[in-house]
Structures are given as structure tokens and as C-alpha cells.
Amino acid sequence: MSIFVKIIKLRGLKSFPNKLQTKLATRKKEGSLRKLPIQNNLTDFSSNDYLGFSLSEMIFKNTHELLKNKNIQKNGATGSRLLSGNHPLYTATEKILATFHNAEAALVFNSGYDANVGFFSSVPQRGDLIFYDELIHASIRDGIQMSHAKSYKFKHNDLEDLQKKLQKVRLKSNSHTELVEVYVVTESVFSMDGDSPDLKSFVEFCKENNCYLIIDEAHAAGVFGEQGVGLLQELEIEDQVFARINTFGKALGCHGAVILGSKDLKSYLVNFARSFIYTTGLPPHSLATIQSAYKALQNTSEIKKLKENITFFNHTLENLRLTSKFIKSNSAIHCCVIPGNERVKKVAQEIQEKGFDVKPILSPTVPKGEERLRICLHSFNSHKEISKVLKLLATFVSN
């Protein structure tokens, strides 16, 4: 027995705090305890790898060649970007991203979580107002909680509710003065629903009400628009949005994120976004992979296949009379609402046993009563596979 263990026994120290043990026990009782999954060989209907880029040999080889040609032989960034970690690939990558996404400037973060936390904890100031969609991503919520601004949620994709909330708050606080800034936050494609707001109307609303609009495009990049530029560029309204957050861990198949906006916004984030300032930069290999993935978007064949699969999926839903069970979506994400953690887990398990990797989304990730199967489509899924998984699902959710 080690000296450390003996000391613990002598002092009577607890092995784990009671409050934390209680929270774990509650999760187990509710059937919502999370566990890390084991990799499987099932047909993929669960990952965010919409274009199959994470498995692309071409992207892997191009990344290697890029590093080799530039004689870069580093495994890490060696420090934060403000110290020693701002290697030349950062400048080149951010220039490519700004050009591709028609932005004045681009700033790369280590992840989408870092980007959202960094932005929302630093940009809105004390006394400012933030209005956010009630289904906004957890990373945005966390960033908002770290902000000194006041925040209010509005009903999902409901511009009328946003209007009422804004008017009410402004009347109550007399916050129409120039000293108070108003930020409106939503997503172009919601990760747990797969649906989209009326982005053009949101742009017009923010113009009329002197608000700054921020859009998270994590699940739209690589899926919508010519060469996967995203939904905002497809609608040609990207220049009317204060900030866009794109991530590379979905359709781009790699890692990291970018905030797109003005040069002033980039300068501000470099100076005040703590998740950017106080972390080691991405290694050169990650930046080279991002460049290779964006180069691969120039060949739109995978995007075309994905869009064809989305159309086929929705047509099959209609043929099987499953449309009413699903949240309406034209994205790569499709959700079948099956209330109850135990019930949705059981359906998911039955489908997985037939060879299809479909994941249940449980409460508290989604509200109780809105548990669901989340089906992600990919360019590499065949029509036969899509038909099979939906016919199988129909046997469990038919009236």
C-alpha cells in the first residue's frame, strides 16, 4: 500500500464528493448518463463528416505535400499565437478563408467552442443586450454566461417573439441610447434540429432595429452554396452580418474554427478574446489540413452527391408517410422525435443491431419530451442504405 493511500485512509478522506455522486446517480436514474462510445463498423448515419473529408486520402496526401514543400517539420505550435505559435501557415490560411468566404478578415480559433466562448465573453460589453435563439448551441450559451451583457432568449426561429422581447426590454430599460449595443444571435443550421431561420428577415430586422447580427454556420459550411461556402453566401447576405462563426470539424473533416468579420473585429478578438489569447496555437499540420480541405471543396462532386441524398431522403420520408415524425429540414441533419430517453435509446439500439449507426439524442441535451433520433446524411451514403434505414425506422414509429 502506498504512503498516499495510507494517508487518505488515516484522514478519512472521501474518494468522491457526495454532491457529484448524487448528480451522477440522478443521471443514471433518468437514463441520461453519458458514456464514451466505442468505435464501430456500422453504416455511418451519425457523424458530422458530411462530405467524407475526414477519410479522404487525397486531403491527407495534399496536406503532407504542402508541409513537405514548405519544409515544415514541426509537431506543435510551441506557444500561443501572441508568443511563439503564430507560424506562417496561419497567415496563409486566414487569407484563404477570408477570400473564400468573402470576408474582410478571418481569425482562426482552436475549435468552434473556443471561437464562440471567446467571441461572446469579450465582444458584448456591460450594459449591452444579447438576444439569442432558445435552441442556440451550448458553446454560445457558455460564452454569453461569461459576458457582462444582459441576455434574453427568444422562441426558436421566431422573429415576432424577438421583436416583442426587444421592444419590451428597450421600453423597460430605456436602452435605445447609443451607449447600448444590441446583439442578435442565431444559427444558419441548427445542430439538434437541422432546420434554418429566415436569415434574410433576420438581416432586415437587425438593420431596422440597429442590431449586430451574429450567425453560427457550423453545419452549413460545406453543405450550402457554390463550393460549400455556406447558407449566408448562398443567400448573398454575408456582408450584412457582423460576425460569422464557421467550424472545420463538420463537413471539412478536420479541426478548428474561424470567425469572419471586419479587420477591426479581428483586431479586437486578438486583444480581448481570452480563449484565443491564453491557449497554444494549432500545430502546422492542422492548418495545412484546413487548406487542403478547402481546396477539395473546389471539386463540388461530393457536395452534389450530398444534396442529392438530402432530396432523396425527404422524398422517401413522404413515400413512407414519416414526414410528420421528423422536424422539417433541407440540411444534412434530420431528426425523428421519439419522446422518452429509454424509448429512443431502445429504437436506436434496434437500428444499430441491423447495421446502421444512428444515435439517440437524450434529455438534457434536448428538452424532456423532445428526445430524438438524429440522422446525419453524407455524400457517401447510398440511396439503398437510406431506404433501408428509413424502412426500418418506420416499423418502430408507425401509427
Image (spheres, helix red, strand yellow):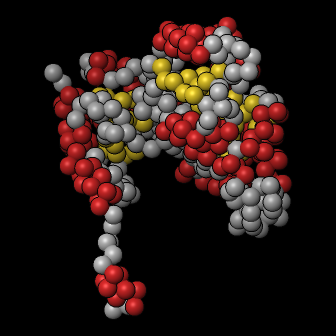
Against 388, residue 271 (above or below) is below
Against 72, residue 274 (above or below) is above
Q: Nearer the viewer, residue 348 or 384?
A: 348
> Which quadrant of the figure contains the C terminus?
top left
**Where is residue 374 shown, x and y percent of the image?**
36, 35
Q: In screen coordinates, is 74 left or right of 21?
A: right
Residue 318 visible in the shown view: yes
Residue, x 47% and y 33% (percent of image)? 191
What is the tally of numbered marks visible in this picture?
Answer: 0
Against 12, residue 42 (above or below) is above
Residue, x 40% and y 91% (percent of image)? 3
Q: Nearer the viewer, residue 56 or 211?
A: 211
**Where is residue 30 shown, x and y percent of the image?**
22, 45
> Which quadrant of the figure contains the N terminus?
bottom left
Q: In screen coordinates, is 31 left or right of 55?
A: left
**Where is residue 355 shown, x and y percent of the image?**
29, 47
Q: Nearer the viewer, residue 87 or 203?
A: 203
Q: In screen coordinates, is 222 left or right of 239?
A: left
Q: In screen coordinates, is 322 left or right of 264?
A: left
Residue, x 69% and y 21% (percent of image)? 180
